[in-house]
Amino acid sequence: MNLLADTTTTAAITAPLFLTDCYKLGHKDLYPTGTTKVYSNYTNRASRIDGVDHVVHFGLQAFIQSYCVEAFAPFFAADEDEAIAEYEKTLVSVLGPEHGIDTSHIRELHQLGYLPLVFRSLPEGTRVPLRVPSFTVENTEADFFWLTNYIETILSAEIWQASTSATTADVYRQLLDAAAQRTGGDSAFVNWQLHDFSFRGMGGAHAAAMSGAGHLLSFTGSDSLGTIDWVNRYYPSTAGSENGQILGSIPATEHSVMCAGIAHEDEQATFERILEKHPVGNVSVVSDTMNFWSVLGEILPTLKNKIMAREGKLVIRPDSGDPADIVCGTRSNPEIPEPEQDQTPEQNPAYFGAVQLLWNEFGGTINAAGFKELDPHIGLIYGDSITPARAKDITERLEKAGFAASNIVFGVGSFTYQYVTRDTFSSAVKATWAEIDGQGYDLLKDPVTDSGMKKSATGRLAVLRDEQGELYLVERADAKAQAASLLEAVWKDGGFLKTQSFKDVRNVLGNIA
């Protein structure tokens, strides 16, 4: 369930007000008397991934539409007394009847009819250096200073994963672009070289859609169909920027299909039936249900004429074993001793690996850079246990063996997109400035017991570019710096001032032409 879009119950009226940490419920009365403004920023402060020092900014527009607009619509539309009664009912159930929290500020928010906030943001799709803010948020009405950091919890939760997945995909994209350039592959093919299979391993459909959209900023291949609706809903096409194809895939089998076929007939008959059902077009077949090497050495050779006569590609999918050894052969693994005598594909197919065996049977061409590319009627995808390190290892082993990187497509799952946390890039929302009794105060967090990573920026902030085009942060920014800042207002007092289509975000990142 997506709590941000749940409007089916009475409790949904106040649901967005409880998408926060419990301790924030009473903060309104804990700020200094006279507080009228709180200004916060979202920054990625550090990286746990070697070599990654920029994080792709993504997800803010979706958060604003889903939370600030859609989730609050039932609250603002509800009867005022009913809404406040529902809010107080939850307070009592959580904190007890003597919670001591005045709810007049919630009534005042209902009467106002919108969230009095302004978000200033870099363009989504920007690679933002560590310790440079992606966006800021502050209240626009003095009585609602408490609202800025009241939404910190849900704001952080809805941004970090989309942004982290976008950054992870960007890492893969740079790696695969470099491999294509070295080995002469078609750069457009890289759009399809990393395929998203992560849906089933994510923390629900909403998380899968957010993460899947981050993947699609750098690639087009995906089986996560739920992402299409998320993209169209939160980053829709505009008259001057049509999103075009958001994602694409091909017909494919799974193990239940193959196991049923093998049990009812046999594996070769199953392959034949699949090819008959798909006489044209690309189709992918799981090939390691029993003996992957028998598929390559016995079944495919008997079907070669049918495969070569088709208008389309048969994509072979191994799904178990060491990915690099399966694709490239154990002969490419320096940790495995060389056999004492020469090997033949029939004697030891694992020694040669899938790409070499497919080349032996189906042939191909030598590209302008001098690397082998498989015949376009046959292909290979490996969709299990892939990481950037493994993808790099495989493309480098292929290159060493004289094969272009374009001979392999990688499928990535929840290990790639779920085995991360908010701490992967130390993503955090922190207040850096407040107005109290009409005077501005620079706020600073700098724990003496910390390494320095948790030290926050301070004051009002601006983001500018240096002579090399790199973004940098200006702390305690004066009016001139703020006016020149690349942090532009995108939403204020209930309405968008600026939006981006998904194509716009892709264009900013620049991975998909």
Image: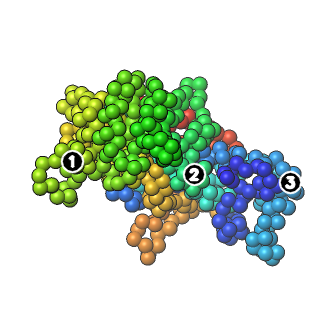
Residue 440 numbered tag: none
Mark 3: which amino acid?
Glu
Mark 2: which amino acid?
Ala
Q: Horizontal placement of 400 versus 475: left or right?
A: left
Mark closest to the chain's N terminus, 2 or 1: 2
Q: Residue visible at 39% across and 60% down?
A: 48
In the rendered image, the vertical position of residue 495 relative to residue 82, given as above or below: above
Mark 1: which amino acid?
Gln
In the rendered image, the vertical position of residue 132 relative to residue 92, given as above or below: above
Q: CA distance from mark 1 to mark 3?
A: 79 Å
**Badge 3 element:** helix
Label 2 vs label 3, nearer the camera: 2
**Badge 1 element:** loop
Residue 80 numbered tag: 3
Q: Quadrant of residue 508?
A: top left
Q: Residue visible at 46% across and 66% down?
A: 454
Label 1 vs label 3, nearer the camera: 1
Taking depth in this image into account, of 361 and 327 the one nearest to the observer is 361
Q: Which residue is mark 2?
A: 207
- Residue 80 horizontal/vertical position (percent): 86, 54
Contact (Cβ within 8 Å) of mark 2 with mark 3: no
Q: Horizontal placement of 410 versus 43: left or right?
A: left
Residue 347 numbered tag: 1
Label 2 vs label 1, nearer the camera: 1
Residue 295 in sight here: yes
Q: CA distance from mark 2 to mark 1?
A: 47 Å
- Residue 225 horizontal/vertical position (percent): 56, 40
